[in-house]
Image (cartoon, rainbow, N blue to C red):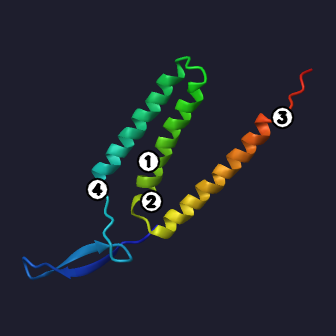
Amino acid sequence: MSENIISPQASPASGSAAPTTHAPGGHHDLIQPGTYYRVFAALIVLTLLTVVVSFYELGPLHLFIGLLIGTVKATLVGLWFMHLIHSTRLTWVVVGAGLFWFGILIVLTMSDFLTRDWITY
């Protein structure tokens, strides 16, 4: 979590120094509270959508729709509440590498699971 640094900056209109928040590195990454409320509302709506979808028999689409809704929710949490939307490129590389390795884990697990000979007793 980066700390915001309060630094005085001269205001051209008034000629006086007014404190402004800057993140280390010099870029502004202030997220308005309304954005958090909208993301929270979207998460609540998606959670309710998950509950509603669970009552319908969708066959093989049921798993896909549940995972899709979960992925959208995880993306919203990562981008806004974990501040990835304003992160450095290195952070994006680390997140991408983690998702890449997670994908490898899922592919290898599913290749083992789907190719096993099931023994029935």
| Residue 60 appears left or right of 16 | right
Please say if the residues under marks 2 and 3 sit with CB atoms less than 8 Å apart: no
Amino acid carrying mark 3 in the image: Arg
Report how far apart the C-alphas of labels 2 and 1 lie in the structure.
Answer: 10 Å
Looking at the rendered structure, the secondary structure element under dot 3 is loop
Report how far apart the C-alphas of labels 2 and 3 lie in the structure.
Answer: 39 Å
Amino acid carrying mark 2 in the image: Leu
Residue 74 on image: x %, y %? 50, 46
**What label does residue 116 carry, if any?**
3
Q: Which residue is mark 4?
A: 32
Front tag of 4 and 2: 2
Determine the image quadrant of residue 63: top right
Q: Which residue is mark 2?
A: 84
Amino acid carrying mark 1 in the image: Leu
Looking at the rendered structure, the secondary structure element under dot 2 is helix
Determine the image quadrant of residue 30: bottom left
Front tag of 1 and 4: 1
Please say if the residues under marks 3 and 1 sit with CB atoms less than 8 Å apart: no
Q: Point out the tag, 3 or 1, that comes first from the N-terminus.
A: 1
Report how far apart the C-alphas of labels 1 and 4 lie in the structure.
Answer: 15 Å
What residue lies at 46% left-to-right and 57% top-to-bottom?
A: 82
Q: Point out the tag, 4 or 2, that comes first from the N-terminus.
A: 4
Of all residues, the one furthest to the right in this rendering is 121
Amino acid carrying mark 4 in the image: Gln
Report how far apart the C-alphas of labels 3 and 1 lie in the structure.
Answer: 36 Å
Viewer-proximal residue among 16 and 79:
79
Looking at the rendered structure, the secondary structure element under dot 4 is loop
Please say if the residues under marks 1 and 4 sit with CB atoms less than 8 Å apart: no
**What label does residue 76 carry, if any?**
1
